[in-house]
Amino acid sequence: MIKAAIIGGVGFVIWRVLQPKYEIGIVLTPEGVRRVDGVDKRLRHEVEEFLQQNLPEQGKVVIRGIRQPGGRLRLVFRGPVHEGQQQRFRNFLLMLLK
């Protein structure tokens, strides 16, 4: 039992180390925007307003972003967001962060 817990703990630590370090983290729920991390405070209001107007109020949506080599921004979406909405937010965020 203790051996399994140790193996599980080591596995968790390795998994956390190998996870990408996201620079942008956004959480949206049906009640509104819950968190916006990694975006300049002066721009957060614009991000929140865009999300409330353009993303569905169905379930929880998590958006994470990381800069790729060459400066490209890669976003990962979790939740009920279709491809058109994802692309619209990518375009908005790229325009805003330039």
Image: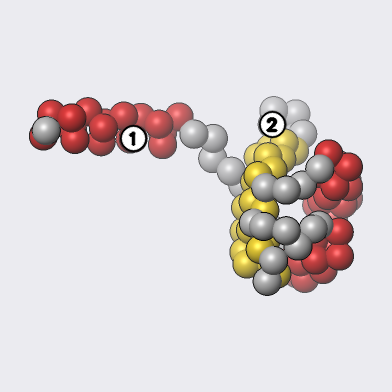
Q: How is the image coloured?
A: secondary structure
Are circles 2 and 1 on residues that touch, CB within 8 Å?
no
Name which residue lies at 85% across and 47% down: 85
Q: Secondary structure at mark 2?
A: loop
**Of residues 86 and 21, the one drawn nearer to the viewer in this rendering:** 86
Q: Is residue 77 above or below residue 19?
A: below
Q: Is residue 90 above or below residue 48?
A: above
Residue type of the residue flagged with mark 2? Gln
Q: Is residue 37 above or below residue 10?
A: below
Along the polypeptide, which appears first: circle 2 or circle 1?
A: 1
Query: x and y percent of residue 23 in the render?
Result: 61, 47
Name which residue lies at 59% across and 43% down: 22
- Residue 48 lies left or right of residue 13; in this view the side is right
Query: x and y percent of residue 50 in the render?
Result: 84, 63
Task: Give the residue at mark 2.
Answer: 68
- Residue 95 lies left or right of residue 2; in this view the side is right
**Of residues 4 and 26, the one drawn nearer to the viewer in this rendering:** 4
Residue type of the residue flagged with mark 1? Phe
* Pointer 2 local density, CA inside 10 Å: few below 14, some 14–19, many at least 20: few
Task: Give the residue at mark 1.
Answer: 12
Query: x and y percent of residue 81 in the render?
Result: 77, 47
Q: Can the viewer see residue 6?
A: yes
